[in-house]
Amino acid sequence: MSRILVTGGAKGVGAAIVRALAASGHDVDFTYRSSRDQALALAEAVASAHQGREIRALPLDLADKAALDGFCEEREAESYFGFVHNAGQPYDALAAMMAQDKAEAAMQVNFWAFTRIAKTVMRAMIRARAGRIVAIGSVAALRGNPGNAAYAASKGALISYAKTLAIETGKRGVTVNVIAPGFVDTDMMAPYAAYREKMEGQIPAGRFARPEEIAGVAAFLMSEPAAYLTGVVLPIDGGLTAQMGVHR
């Protein structure tokens, strides 16, 4: 059975993706940065729930370029069928107040780490003439939102890169797509708890997404029926980007 690599898989959307992929019959390697106990517990629980599946938790700080290079060199012998770049680093600041070092740190985790790992895993995919690459982006890259300049730019870079990569690898049986979630009910939304009711009121679906709803789309993109779907951005946002920003 095929093996899939997931970044940032210890908790939240990443953990839901690990579970969904294992349930779909895949072996999964997933990275974690600081949540070691959580990651190991998840790997054990998922492997127990899906007998025969191999689930490996791998430590990696995507912000550490040397560590990332070492990780990629170790993975060159692996033949991954799929890669899901879920790890992300938020950075909220108005453009006029943006600190370049913090913006660059977000870009390293959100974008450059994706390109580095994709470059490594796509070689085996091209040789096998089969592979699936998915980047978890954000609706922030599709609609302007005050305070999101650096974060949105990093996710926008993902979209541009993924579309180009999709064209370059299309004839080799590799698909490359971006999932752009809206607001998802995870720990990342904790700082906005006081505004949650107001925020949900502006979403046509009237609620935040569940991590499993993002994970289900990621699992579908790894499936056989998704073989002709490439170079697209899929907003999973409860209708947020479909509506006009100003309404009665």
Image (cartoon, rainbow, N blue to C red):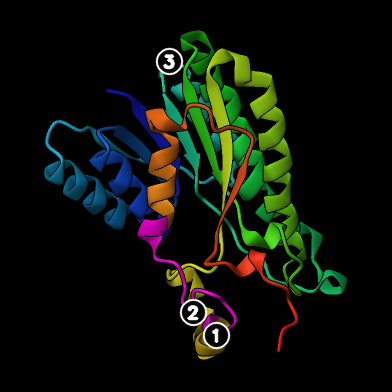
Q: On residue 206, which mark appears?
A: 2
Q: Is residue 211 a member of the stretch shown in magenta?
A: yes
Q: Give me the residue at 38% from left, 32% from top.
A: 223
Q: CA distance from mark 3 to mark 1?
A: 49 Å
- Asked if the residues shown at circle 1 and circle 2 are in contact, with their CB atoms under 8 angstroms apart, the answer is yes
Mark identifier at residue 201: 1
Q: Percent from the top left, x then y, of residue 98?
A: 81, 68
Residue at 59% over, 58% down: 89
Q: Say which of marks 3 and 1 sits in front.
A: 1
Residue 102 seen in this snapshot: no
Residue 72 visible? The answer is yes
Image location (x, y in percent) of residue 248 = 71, 89
Mark 3 or mark 1: name the one nearer the start of the chain.
3
Three-letter amino acid code at disc 3? Ala
Estimate how packed mark 2 is, as few (under 14), some (14 to 19) or many (20 or more) residues with alpha carbons within 10 Å: some
Classify the position of the N terminus by image quarter.
top left
Give the mark nearer the N terminus: 1 vs 2.
1
Q: Nearer the viewer, residue 32 or 26?
A: 26
Q: Position of residue 199 (x, y in %)?
A: 57, 82
Identify the mark nearer the N-term, 2 or 3: 3
Residue 25: quadrant of the picture: top left
Label 1 is placed on what type of residue? Answer: Gly
Q: Secondary structure at mark 2?
A: loop
Q: Nearer the viewer, residue 222 or 65?
A: 222
Whether residue 183 sits left or right of residue 148 in the image: it is left
Which one is nearer the viewer's eye here, 220 or 25?
A: 220
SS type, badge 3: loop
The residues colored magenta run 200-213
Q: Secondary structure at mark 1?
A: helix
Magenta-colored segment: predominant secondary structure: loop
Vertical position of residue 49 compared to residue 239: above or below: above
